[in-house]
Image (cartoon, helix red, strand yellow):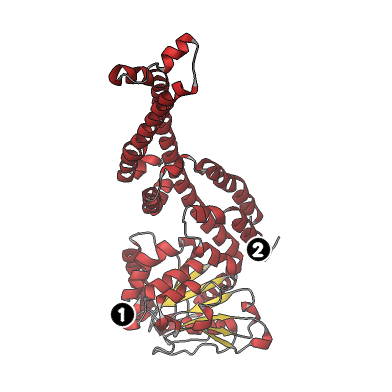
Amino acid sequence: MDEKELQNLLKRRIHQTLLPLFEKYNRDFSDLDSLLKWKPIVLLIGNYSSGKSTLINELSGEEIQRTGQAPTDDSFTIITHDGADVAGEEIPGSSLVNDENLPFTKLKALGEQLISHLHLKKVATPLLTDMAIIDSPGMLDSVTEKDRGYDYMAVISHLAKLADLVVLMFDPLKAGTIKETYTAIRDTLPESAGEDRLVFVMSRIDECDSTSDLVRSYGTLCWNLSQMTGRKDIPHIFLTCAPDSQRPGLDTAPWSQERDQLKNKILTAPKFRVFHILQDIDRQVNELQLTCEAMVNFSSQVRTKLLDIGKLTAVASILAFFFSGLLSKLLFNFPEESMLEALIQGQVGLSHLTLPLAGVTLVIMAFWIWLSRITFPRLLKQRLENPRSLVTLESDYRRHLWEKVEDHVVGLLGSAGLGQIFAAHRRNLNRIKKFLGQDLKEFYKEIR
């Protein structure tokens, strides 16, 4: 089964099995749904003059993007091949964000300024038949989100979630010193893309005057990355330059292999698409499972309280049935003959049942008020104050997931009523476990 067939099968299975559960627990399905909609994506980000457009032109074999030292494009440009007959066609952002068949509809919420800086280019490059490359505006130091007119980091976050590969490009003259680069690496990308999808590139090394100049730039980038990631172990950084670039004092020939490795990694991104989808499904379904577990345990506690009160209600109802008439006669001299007395004499009539049934009704009403106005609100308050008590967090992975879903669980509890007694959380949890334990493992086997 090839990647496209596997992706389509995944889409059908997810919609049939999981979508109803995501809706049941008010979990956002849109990011996962966007992944399932379209083709693999490679996102290029970096400061102006970092070589993004040059790399795209080299990959495609034609001059698709303008290049230069100064900013040449301030738009998010989605580049793909959609058939030779439509090469050269451009689709504006207003159409992209309103097309439900494309994964860009969430960008509509980021405003008109973004939409006017978003478009899709169809090119005659067969290499891009099964993938798309997104060229982004260069990251800056001085420009704020307000000055751009839209939330730049929110766009990067959304596109990074969609991307199967995120390529961060640096140039030797600004080796990781751009403010927006820092924000992206430190805050935005860790939440949007796994480390295995991030590729670091220092391009344009032919700008260095000598090998020692290159070493200094590389060292600066490594140090800056360690500060941005908070880690000492630095990921592999591709050192590349444009083809046929030469500078006296620097031999760039040894780095041509790095350039080829980078291009191969980008062009093989479609092979990671299904794995990327499975990773996201795995994470989101585990979050859903933890949410469902919390609701299972809460509903179980509510049922336990109901059972305890039910036992007291049953005892009190029996006493009320047999002794309410006798008590009323002692206190109010009514009725003339209680149901218990009539029962002893073996002459019970419908008139004797009036007070016993009224007594049972009052008991049931009193205990229901006790449950709904005192016991349930008290239990709910306790769980809202300590929702963590509803789940078992025996591993770092589950603790990390809980940090993501805790507020959502609190929201579900806050809107919960006594209907939790009858909710089918246990059955839903079993469906989720079955998917994780069987269906998901089968899909992972298919891509090995």
| Neighbourhood count class around disc 2 (C-alpha, 10 Å): few under 14, some 14–19, many 20 upward | some
Residue located beneath label 2 in the image = 8
Up the image or down, 189 lies above or below 77; here it is: above
The residue under the point 59% across, 71% down is 38
Residue linked to disc 1: 146
Q: Residue type at mark 2: give it.
A: Asn
Image quadrant of residue 260?
Answer: bottom right
x and y percentages locating residue 410 in the rendered image? 36, 50
Q: Position of residue 76 (x, y in %)?
A: 46, 81
Is residue 78 placed above or below 352 in the rendered structure? below
- Residue 384 in the image, given as x and y percentages of width and height: 33, 45
Q: In this view, does 179 lie to the left or right of 419?
A: left
- The percent coordinates of residue 436 (x first, y second) are 56, 48
Q: Which amino acid does label 1 sit on?
A: Lys
Residue drawn 46% across the image and 41% down it? 296
**SS for dot 2:** helix
Task: Report, in whole angstroms, how far the alpha carbon at label 1 lies from the one at label 2.
Answer: 40 Å
